[in-house]
Image: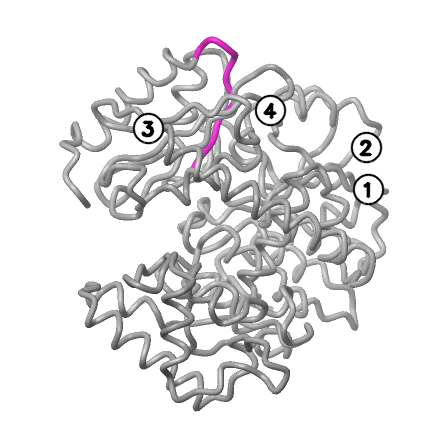
Amino acid sequence: MDGPVPELTEHAAACAARLRDADRVLLASHIDADGLTSAGIASTALERAEIPFETVFCRQLDAAAVADIAATDYDTVLFTDFGSGQLDIVADHEAAGDFHPVIADHHQPAEGVETDHHLNPLRFGLNGASELSGAGAAYVLARALEPEGIDNRDLAALAVVGAVGDMQDTNGELRGANAGIVDEGVEAGVVEEGTDLRIYGRQTRALPKLLQYATDVRIPGISNNEAGAIEFLTELDVPCRGDDGEWKRWVDLTGDERQTLASALMRRAIASGVPASRIDDLVGTTYVLTAEAEGTELRDVSEFSTLLNATARYDRADVGLAVCLGERDAALDRARRLLRNHRKNLSNGLQWVKEHGVRVEDNLQWFDAGDEIRETIVGIVAGMAVGTDATRNGIPVLAFADTEEGEVKVSSRGSYVMVREGLDLSAVMREASRSVGGDGGGHDVAAGATIPKGEVEAFIAEADRIVGEQLGDADGDDD
């Protein structure tokens, strides 16, 4: 079997064999959508392979978290969606005989150290930021773990959710190794790939809200304008309200009605002076999970990933994992309540950034939210702020927030344009944080760190220096 990602097949088989040899396994995973789907995939694969396991989640896999894991009586630990960036710490515990690690990750590995069972696309010439997510790596491992008579291709649905949640569809569709997983999901009948309006909320939002909040491509008079969105819909030759007088959702429209609305939206964008490249972004490749009920957050992969982000980031990883494992009653209801709170917090966080602004250094910009924005969502807020009037184009954004442990969480966001010019935020976060007694890592386009309280200014100075070297002393021009 070549598997969905042929480059990883042989090593995935070796990792699977190591897990089968274990009496039991501790599964440790990250808390974002990619981490939760990784854990969901790995949990199901281990259960089907009849390998006893326990699951734990960590906000950040630092030295203390790895020490806690080492203090358990598990001889084998499976790390999903993290572990590569902390390989030096993990390897020290392996050398001490504390546990044997198996890692399924996609983040930039720590340099100068390696372990036998390390499944990471970056080790095999694939881009971990755009071609394969943590959930994708877990899926490759799950396919290698299949017992006789078991087909794990249904887990491709979660892998697609993880990839989209990790923003690997930024350029309009999932590419590279992710595309192979999509193909397997389609073959298994759990994923449907199509072309549709690429606006968040197609399954659940009433049409006026769908258009009002569609700000990735800003259309004057409609985006952030409820009255304008309603007026636009009212003028269309499309029945946008149901027999009960309530607004329909996108999913409630027929194919012809969707085409009419999408064409009218594009004409409005053209008339409003929206650049052609941005107008093209209105329509593109979309992914639907066919086993999920139509009109729910779980049907659309973007909405599914947002729902998951609303669980573990508020200390309810158990809820997110339960949803990934198929629970659709109490767990889903709880997740939906958390999602409503999550959306409110994101909106408030973005508004805080707009009101307080950012500070601009030579090569980067930053804001320190203190305890005004939760540390687990400050990175999402930073990503939302990119491209708005609150930030400056052409240089990365760094966001700081206080942690419950008395430290400072740092999240950084760039763009693929900056990456092509040399930006590597994974290196920036790792090097700058370690210079002040912290640690970090991630991807070239998005990364994070944790640093001691009181070291923010020193960290910014070092990060600004490193970014300047990477970008050749950015001049701040728009990208």
Residue that numbered label 4 is attached to: 62
Decide: marks 4, 2 in contact (CB < 8 A)? Answer: no
Which residue is disc 2 drawn over?
Answer: 74
Q: Earlier in the sequence, mark 2 or mark 1?
A: 1
Contact flag, marks 2 and 1 (Cβ < 8 Å): yes
Against 357, is 161 above or below?
Answer: below
Horizontal side of residue 99 vs 378, given as left or right = right
Give the magenta-colored segment's residue range: 447-455
- Residue linked to disc 3: 358
Pick the front one: 224 or 202: 224
**Residue 54, numbered circle:** 1
Q: Identify which residue is drawn at 64% across, 21% down.
A: 404
Between marks 3 and 1 in the image, the one whose residue lies nearer the viewer = 3
Q: Report the predominant secondary structure element of the magenta stretch.
A: strand
Q: Secondary structure at mark 3?
A: loop
Q: Is residue 451 magenta?
A: yes
